[in-house]
Image: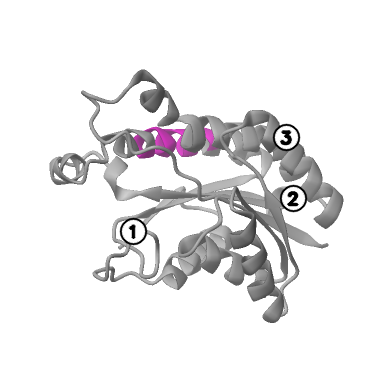
Amino acid sequence: MAKTIVVAGFGPGISTAVAERFGKEGFSVALVARNAERLQAGVKALEAKGIQAAAFPADLSDTAAIQKLVAAVRSKLGPITVLHWNAYGSPAGDLLSASAEELRSVFALPVVGLLTATQAVLQDLREQKKNSALLITNGGLGLFDPQLDALGVEWNAQGLSVANSAKHKVVRLLSAKLKPEGVYVGEVVVTSLIKGSAFDSGNATLEASAVAAKFWELYEKRSDVSALIG
């Protein structure tokens, strides 16, 4: 059976590595982000490696756009087997000075967008059962640890920290809900900076390919809900 992965929040780093890894395993790849030029470049790079891919420009904070996106992917590539959610929202750096709009936007992508996309692809996932999955990229700032809390303040990423914590809970709730139906839900919590990513200022130590390998391991084993890497 043909398999399709939707890489939501495509860019340099983890999402590129995940697209390549799953593409090499026989998946068709749907790349999703707002930047159409970046998407087209990603498609060309994947096609050069013999991977079927297509670009779907969309604003993942727009719930109506997500519905249209899923319909477009189904039309072009067939039923969706895996949704990889790699999108993150506003850092809302200082919770004490962030505007109400900034605070609301903290949850627009990592929580509302993720759940909207999950609802949109759920029928496909349920029908494919043992092959289907929701795979979520998460960050270490969301973990409950005094040192990480201090880093969230130091890096002016307090809103991102809160969003990561919320996303971690969403992952576990979705896993508990969907596991009896044969749909796997898992996250990789990244605790280091990724080489070549938008956050790499030259000091990053973690290869994106290692994160992609961890996602593939989770997908194949379908047991652990969460894995840390960094």
Magenta residues span 164-174
Q: Are marks 1 and 2 in contact (CB under 8 Å)?
A: no
Report whether residue 50 is seen: yes
Q: Is residue 151 left or right of residue 169?
A: left
Please provide percent x and percent y for residue 203. Answer: 24, 69
Q: Are marks 3 and 1 in contact (CB under 8 Å)?
A: no
Q: Name the residue carrying label 1.
A: 199
- Badge 3 or badge 2: first in the primary sequence: 3
Look at the image and tell me in which quarter the N terminus lies: bottom right
Most extreme residue toward the right is 75
Q: Residue at x 64, y 30 (%)?
A: 63
Residue neighbourhood size for the residue with mark 2, other residues' Cα within 10 Å, grouped as few (<14), some (14–19), many (≥20): many
Report whether residue 25 is seen: no
Q: Tell me the amino acid under the disc marked 3.
A: Gln
Residue 80: image tag:
2
Q: Is residue 51 left or right of residue 91?
A: right
Real-space Cα distance between discs 1 and 2? Answer: 30 Å
Residue neighbourhood size for the residue with mark 1, other residues' Cα within 10 Å, grouped as few (<14), some (14–19), many (≥20): few
Q: Provide the major secondary structure of the magenta segment.
A: helix
